[in-house]
Amino acid sequence: MEHLYLSRFFSHSTSCFQKLSCKAFLLLFFIITTVHAQWIRKADELNKRAEGNNVIYLNKFYVFGGFSDNPVIENKNEVYDLATNKWKALAPFPAGKEITHQGVVLVDDNVWHIGGRSVDAHGPVSSQVVIYNITTDTWSNGPELIDPATGEKFPIGGGGYGLIGRTIHVFGGFGPTICEDQSRLHLTLDVDKYLADPVNTTWENKSAPMPIPRNHLSYVVLGGKIYALGGQFKHDCLAVDQKYCHVYDPVTNTWKRLSDIPVQRSHAEASTFAIDGKIFLVAGQGASNHTQNTTYQFSPQSNNGAGSWTSLSAYQLPGSFLGLSSKVAGSSFIITNGARDNYANERKETYSIQVKRSDARTLGFSVPCTSLTRASGTSSVFRNLLYCLEDTSPYLVTSNVGWLKITKNASGNVNLNGTNVEVSISTLGLAAGNYTGTIKATVLSTGSTATFCVNLQVTSGSSGSLITDIHTSSSGNYEQSILKVNGLYYSDRTYVITSAPEFLLNAPFIKTPNNDKKNTGSTVLTFSLTQSATVYAAYDPRATSLPEWLQDWKPETQKLGTNEPGISTLSLYSKDYPAGSVTIGGNLQSPATGSASNYIIIVKPKDAASSLRTTGLHSFWPESGSEKIPAEKQAGMKPLLFPNPATDHIRIEFTDKRKQISEIQLMEPNGSIQSISKSNIRFSEQGCKIQLSGLDLSPGIHFIVMHLTNGETEIARILMR
């Protein structure tokens, strides 16, 4: 073990004593050792490099790419084991895939290498994505960077990269050429969708681009946000280093300007990392292209959220570097490789220093509180990102109310990138009013917690839900709503319904995310029906072939009008389902072609008059204000229902005493059903009577459904006014 500078200092100690008094020497020695002596020399890398990139995985330090003898790209990769102080060779880049200036994102045990410069360090910008699997020590191709507007390849290098939840972000950087700092694209990729369907899943450009476009910026994910720090303008065209700092919030899809770095800084992207809620920016290139030996710390919560910078002199480096690789693993602050003093001096030395780590495990949710309005008897799904500001920690998520249930990622391990916790919100059985629930995440190792609240306003609607238990294999939001003209029909767009067949108005339907329009899965959406119903799919009329799940549905002549650009209607298809589970596949499940917009699902209960047996159905419409049935009209009328129209009470009489009622239900115009207590039924020798009072029903035709002991069903229509 070598303590840096001590041996070199003592080799000149005689001349020093000749020039300095003992006291002065000891003072100088104390100063030097205070600044530098804590850095401990470790085993050298197997190969020298600068401007590579790196990740920490299971307490090992993985280093990739960069250049060795500038501008030659180093195609060899290696891993450092902190426990054994040894470097080991990894599988090199595949032939022709060598890269530098790339971004890296660790997803599970896969290291994604995104964009960069190919051929050599002066080479063209690349759109390639290659993925290294740590477990198998193998490489594979990933989804090439594109401009989604054109579908053409879009090379990016030296940009910003991050993984939030299960979504990769790519922004900034230079591209498509070296001297262009691009601001058109902020690409995202849903990793789980890609893994499930790599052929049809690609990059999207729906997130806000980074302000003040620049390249060679440092990037960090912390607290559910992405930080973009420093960088430079015009990489190969009179480059100028910058102080600018921004943070991106995916919840609001906005960027915020932060406090500038005290000095210009670039070329520190592989040596910038989060540690215990703060960010370290180590070494890099400063003014006039000078290498640096500094460690700066950024505190995001300071200065009213604008953050503040501190120079950590205790971590002054043992040399001046740019393109350095640095991370913290446990309490070991590691630096390795980089160009020392100038670009032509690539190094392979490794050093470490101990840092004091926090024992805290601080959890947080990206959305601390949400307010929702839902109709009674509906269900929907809400997702919130749970993150930890320190190291990966085991967690458990719970709810304090029955109408909030954790349906995905209720437990597991959470890290800086975060985990999307899925919560189901069911208003089944809830009366109109305001409700508050709390979701709590707990770190199992420390007991620390984080919460988010759900303020729910339940509006009058169905008192029994036709659709329940909505689940999806997608990361998008599938939520129940009521179909109305001028109402939104996607959960992630602002397009509205402009017209609809009258029989579908006010019907329950499932809003889908239009981002799922390319989904090819066979089981994307499942839900349950509480009674038999006709299910309608509103599908893109541009389709030239339907997905497998829609093949046997009946095409309808009526359509759903929309204001979506490119189409003015959605075609309707229907299929009858009994009560129970319904499974819907992806919008582009094979052999579907041509559809460029996602479907929505509408549900309508089967018409009571046609779907239920209606033996001996009669209804009586008395003269205005009358509640008595004239004797001459009673003959042959069973059952008898009055008054009709009704306001707040109804009386039903069966004059045939053989007709005995086992169950009675009230069906509202929107298809919801509520059971009526048997205490409202009175039996006698003359038959039975049903008295309903205190009704609070919307105007329109309602159905009284009476299930009889002989297996028959009677239905009476009642007009509420």
Image (spheres, grey):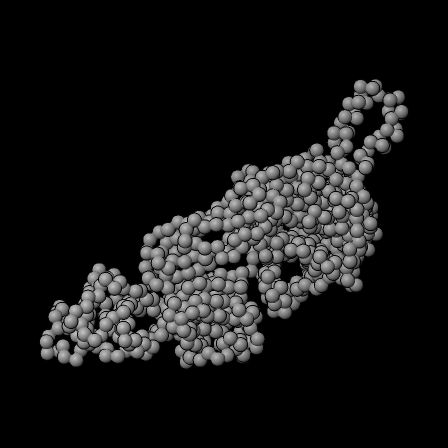
Quarter of the figure with residue 635: bottom left
In front of the other: 696 or 75: 696
In front of the other: 81 or 489: 81
Quarter of the figure with residue 314: top right
The tally of labels here is 0
Q: Quadrant of the C terminus?
A: bottom left
- What residue is drawn where x is 23% and y is 70%? 719
The vertical placement of 320 against 628, above or below, is: above
Q: From the top left corner, tell me how far across and down residue 168 is, in percent.
A: 61, 57
Q: Quadrant of the N terminus?
A: top right
- What residue is drawn where x is 42% and y is 79%? 556
Q: From the top left corner, tell me how far across and down residue 238 is, in percent.
A: 73, 50
Left or right: residue 45 compared with residue 211: right
In front of the other: 36 or 432: 432
Left or right: residue 524 compared with residue 607: right
Regarding residue 213, the answer to whether it shows in the image is: yes
Left or right: residue 104 compared with residue 495: right
In front of the other: 713 or 424: 713
What residue occupies the far left of the structure in this picture?
631
Quarter of the figure with residue 641: bottom left
